[in-house]
Image: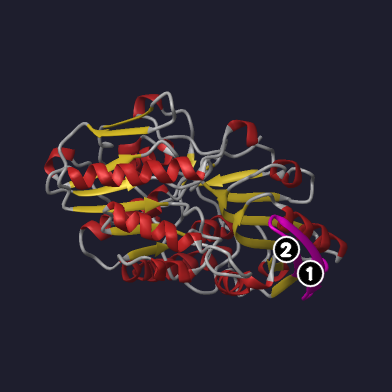
Amino acid sequence: MASVIFVPPSPSQSRVSLRFPRFFTADHSRLGLSTRTCVGCNLVEPLKHGNGKPCIPLINSELAIPNFLTSSNVRNPINKHDTRLRIFPGTANPALSQEIACYMGLELGKIKIKRFADGEIYVQLQESVRGCDVYLVQPTCPPANENLMELLIMIDACRRASAKNITAVIPYFGYARADRKTQGRESIAAKLVANLITEAGANRVLACDLHSGQSMGYFDIPVDHVHGQPVILDYLASKTICSDDLVVVSPDVGGVARARAFAKKLSDAPLAIVDKRRHGHNVAEVMNLIGDVKGKVAVMVDDMIDTAGTIAKGAALLHQEGAREVYACSTHAVFSPPAIERLSSGLFQEVIITNTIPVTEKNYFPQLTVLSVANLLGETIWRVHDDCSIYQNFLDLSKLQRQILSIEDSIKL
């Protein structure tokens, strides 16, 4: 049965046991959630960015998380009227918005969003935001045009309601792949969308795993770029995979830097590269493999899975070259047809994604595991609101992680 994310219920309604990352956990008693953990391969180097407090569903586990793994930086529930911070959800991913608010101890702001008969979007804030620090959670995932327009209208509504600061929290930034001209007379849609968000009135953007770092430069306002990799890394580190058997695979040459950084943090695993040639959009042809995967557990890393053509052909090649198992890891699960058929065809031992884009129930399949970035985004929002360094605070977690790894090594001995 597929592992899926549930919106955290109230304590009296909780039916699901959630496993939280080992070195950074939320106030579970407040959320009404029990925690789980397990020991796996070590990370040779501390994570450069903490993963907040993502929750990973794990059913029928009896292991409780040790007290020393609980972060001291736990926020108490806050009355929304006692703070100038407001979080408003769009309609693209309301479950993620609810999880973020749950972690932060806040209630979601009241907002009315509806479509007229002709498809026009109407937005009205149903509470005052005058002088407030407002965060609008809205990924521009499919249908991209609808969700993007909704975000722009939400920003405009907040600006006209005299919000002090408006931050567009975009877990998945649509149009990010159109970030350069590869042929004559092409548009650079990523820059256009950045201009639209800026001109609508946003003061800041908080994005997760942009397709390319250069997209940050398209905005004329500050951009906080957080990475979903630590969430996936922490999950893989909990699995009982021998570090000597791991090899990290980049599905194309363009993702080598991402895969290299991933491999360095995952027991400094060796790196392999799938060489491919693309004949058109969403059409890829695998040519050959650079690196050795024979008898190895191959972990394919990419920022998104759209039609799954690239990653599926890469997995087939890895099996031909003697890989024992193949895992697919991606932050954004776009899952355009026929992605589900390709991913569930038996090529993958497990497909690991995050919930930056909501996954509908019809797209569940047995190999699918969905990890939550809600607490990663929630912690980032707190630090932006408090005018604190995002990355330095994440780096401070490395000290705690070193202690955890040392204790785990002692237990193994």
**Point 55% across, 61% down: residue:** 178
**Point 36% across, 45% down: residue:** 151
Numbered mark located on residue 293 in the image: 1
Q: Is residue 216 magenta?
A: no
Q: Is residue 123 above or below residue 64?
A: above
Amino acid type, callout 2: Ala
Q: Secondary structure at mark 1?
A: loop
Q: Quadrant of residue 272?
A: bottom right
Q: Is residue 40 left or right of residue 54?
A: right
Q: CA distance from mark 2 to mark 1?
A: 7 Å
Any part of residue 67 in sight: no
**Labels 2 and 1 touching (C-beta < 8 A):** yes
* Percent position of residue 397, x then y: 37, 66
| Count of all numbered marks drawn on residues in the image | 2
* Percent position of residue 211, x then y: 53, 63
The main secondary structure of the magenta stretch is strand
| Image quarter of the N terminus | top right
Q: Is residue 324 left or right of residue 139?
A: right
Q: Secondary structure at mark 2?
A: strand
* Percent position of residue 356, x then y: 48, 48
Name the residue that disc number 2 marks: 298
Q: Which residues are magenta?
A: 275-295
